[in-house]
Image (spheres, rainbow, N blue to C red):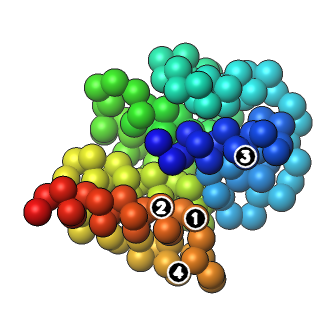
Amino acid sequence: MKTPIRLILSCALLSPGALLAAGGGGGGAASDARPSDPVVESATLATQREDWARAQGLWKDVLARNPNDAEYHNMFAYSLRKGPNPDMSLVFKHYNEALRLDPKHRGANEYLGEAYLMVNNVPKAKEQLGVLDKLCFFPCKEYSDLKKSIAEYEAKAK
């Protein structure tokens, strides 16, 4: 629930194109402004509305045109993970591709950790938390959110 709220708040302050240019998922150095893309804007809006089927289709289209964009892989994986009956192998494939393209992408590191929790792999989720701890000079939202998710997961397990 916290991530869509973050997306909505970010988009309230920035246009969808600017959200992605700013590394909406917390990417590394994404200060280059991206040109406006109506498909990206539609995908962002579908994600905000939690219309997972539409978001998945749109992010897939965006990725077909831009296969070397870490944020697009991150958002496609996010929409897959949040939708019903996620194909976790596809989720992991796209988060890992996002991180291959941009190892410092904070959003992809956080979301990958959350995906590991979905498959009951707490040690791997904690590895992602360690990565975020190194990436964030000061505590960042992605680190705090993943840390909270791990704590909640472990509390439920007891």
Q: Which residue is mark 1?
A: 141
Q: Position of residue 56 (x, y in %)?
A: 51, 24
Q: Quadrant of the C terminus?
A: bottom left
Q: CB atoms at circles 4 and 3 under 8 Å apart? A: no
Taking depth in this image into account, of 11 and 116 the one nearest to the observer is 11
- The residue depicted at 51 percent of the width and 48 percent of the height is 2
Q: Position of residue 24 (x, y in %)?
A: 68, 49
- Where 32 sits versus 37, above or below? below
Q: Which residue is mark 2?
A: 145
Q: CA distance from mark 3 to mark 2?
A: 16 Å
**What amino acid does circle 3 point to?**
Ser
Tell me if 36 is positioned left or right of 24 in this view.
right
Of marks 4 and 1, the one in the foreground: 1
Q: CA distance from mark 4 to mark 3?
A: 24 Å
Taking depth in this image into account, of 20 and 93 the one nearest to the observer is 20
Q: Position of residue 145 (x, y in %)?
A: 47, 61
**Element under label 2?**
helix
- The residue depicted at 21 percent of the width and 63 percent of the height is 154
**What amino acid does circle 1 point to?**
Lys
Q: CA distance from mark 1 to mark 2?
A: 6 Å
Q: CB atoms at circles 1 and 2 under 8 Å apart? A: yes
Q: Which residue is mark 4?
A: 134
Counting residues from the N terminus, which is met first, the one under dot 4 or under dot 3?
3
Of marks 4 and 3, the one in the foreground: 3
**Element under label 3?**
helix
**What amino acid does circle 2 point to?**
Asp
Q: Which residue is mark 3?
A: 10
Residue 40 picture quarter: top right
Tell me if 86 is positioned left or right of 18 in this view.
left
Q: CA distance from mark 2 to mark 4?
A: 15 Å
- Where 26 sits versus 86, above or below? below
Q: Residue furthest left?
A: 158
